[in-house]
């Protein structure tokens, strides 16, 4: 299984939509490639964002029946072109606006052991679109499932020919890994097992350049202590990437008010 296939399965896992075979393939791939967990976090963040912004709406029986009938009728595997997977059904029959899809060319490279091919994904996208139209208007599926900007930045850094990284483990067990690319001038900090800041506090990122701290944005880890945060501004080789605990919104005077809880040297 390649990384793109795993990223697809990660979305299905986040949606609790995998078959038993797909779930086994997903777990085996994750165990063999633990660094692919960024796709897991990205998919989970997308689903969480959806659930937190959409008010539950009960779709009309006609729309619900149409969507699920379409999904159940699709074969588990098919070599049919993606454009023939779903015909242009008239949603007006359900008194709802027609949903337009921008169909992108997607290679059907799903694992042979998996039934999660392109047609299944297109059907899932159709079901999302129907719910979105009922819930809060025109939001595209690509926007819904697009990974967070920090995940995109991390992927760009890792794909760069001069990508570098360094890790540090703090006394409290927090593991922080800095990723950067000099050619991109971009850096990302990834944390694991990082405790949530106290109420009214946030974590602030800094480039420490010699004796000078330069504010680089704020972030908060998720419930599991994971965070993928882009540092604002251009990193220079030799900077120390540090994190301090500051009031909500960041340090009021632009300088650290506490001792760093995380410090990762980049040289």
Image (cartoon, helix red, strand yellow):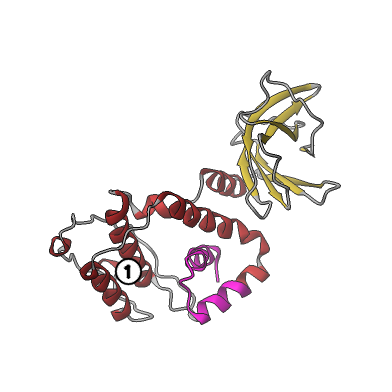
Q: Is residue 201 left or right of residue 146?
A: right
Q: Residue at label 1? A: 123
Specify the quadrant of the image occupied by residue 34: bottom right
Q: Outermost residue toward the right?
A: 171
Q: Is residue 203 above or below residue 118?
A: above
Q: For residue 22: magenta?
A: yes
Report the label total: 1
Q: Main secondary structure of the magenta part?
A: helix
Return the x and y of residue 150 as percentages of the image width and height: 56, 44
Q: Is residue 98 left or right of residue 214?
A: left
Query: Which of 16 and 150 lies nearest the eye of the viewer?
Result: 16
Specify the quadrant of the image occupied by residue 183: top right
Q: Is residue 104 visible?
A: yes
Q: Residue at x 55, y 71 (%)?
A: 1
Which element is circle 1 on?
helix
Q: Is residue 67 above or below residue 245?
A: below
Specify the quadrant of the image occupied by residue 67: bottom left
Query: Which of 216 and 81 lies nearest the eye of the viewer?
Result: 216
Tell me the quadrant of the picture where the C terminus can be found. top right
Q: Residue at x 77, y 31 (%)?
A: 238
Q: Is residue 184 above or below residue 120?
A: above
Q: Is residue 85 visible?
A: no
- Density class for disc 1 (Cα within 10 Å; few <14, some 14-19, many ≥20) is some
Q: Is residue 147 left or right of residue 34?
A: left
**Extent of the magenta region:** 1-28
Return the x and y of residue 45 as percentages of the image width and height: 53, 53
Return the x and y of residue 50 as percentages of the image width and height: 43, 53
Q: For residue 201: magenta?
A: no
């Amino acid at each position: 299984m390649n990384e793109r296939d795993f990223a697809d399965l990660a979305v299905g896992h986040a949606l609790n939509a995998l078959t038993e075979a797909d779930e086994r393939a997903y777990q085996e791939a994750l165990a063999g490639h633990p660094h692919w967990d960024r796709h897991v976090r990205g998919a989970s963040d997308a689903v969480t964002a959806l659930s937190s912004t959409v008010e539950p709406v009960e779709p009309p029986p006609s729309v619900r029946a149409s969507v699920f009938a379409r999904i159940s009728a699709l074969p588990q595997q098919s070599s049919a072109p993606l454009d023939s997977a779903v015909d242009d059904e008239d949603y007006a029959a359900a008194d709802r606006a027609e949903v337009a899809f921008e169909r992108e060319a997607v290679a059907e490279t799903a694992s042979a052991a998996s039934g999660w091919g392109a047609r299944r994904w297109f059907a899932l996208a159709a079901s999302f679109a129907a719910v979105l139209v009922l819930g809060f208007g025109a939001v595209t599926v690509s926007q819904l499932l697009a990974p967070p900007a920090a995940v995109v930045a991390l992927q760009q850094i890792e794909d760069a020919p001069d990508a570098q990284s360094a890790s540090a483990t703090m006394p409290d067990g927090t593991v922080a890994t800095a990723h950067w690319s000099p050619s991109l001038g971009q850096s990302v900090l990834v944390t694991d097992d990082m405790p949530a800041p106290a109420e009214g506090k946030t974590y602030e990122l800094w480039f420490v350049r010699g004796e000078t701290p330069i504010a680089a944005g704020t972030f908060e880890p998720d419930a599991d202590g994971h965070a993928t945060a882009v540092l604002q501004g251009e990193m220079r080789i030799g900077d120390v990437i540090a994190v301090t605990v500051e009031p909500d919104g960041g340090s009021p005077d632009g300088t650290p008010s506490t001792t760093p809880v995380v410090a990762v040297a980049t040289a």
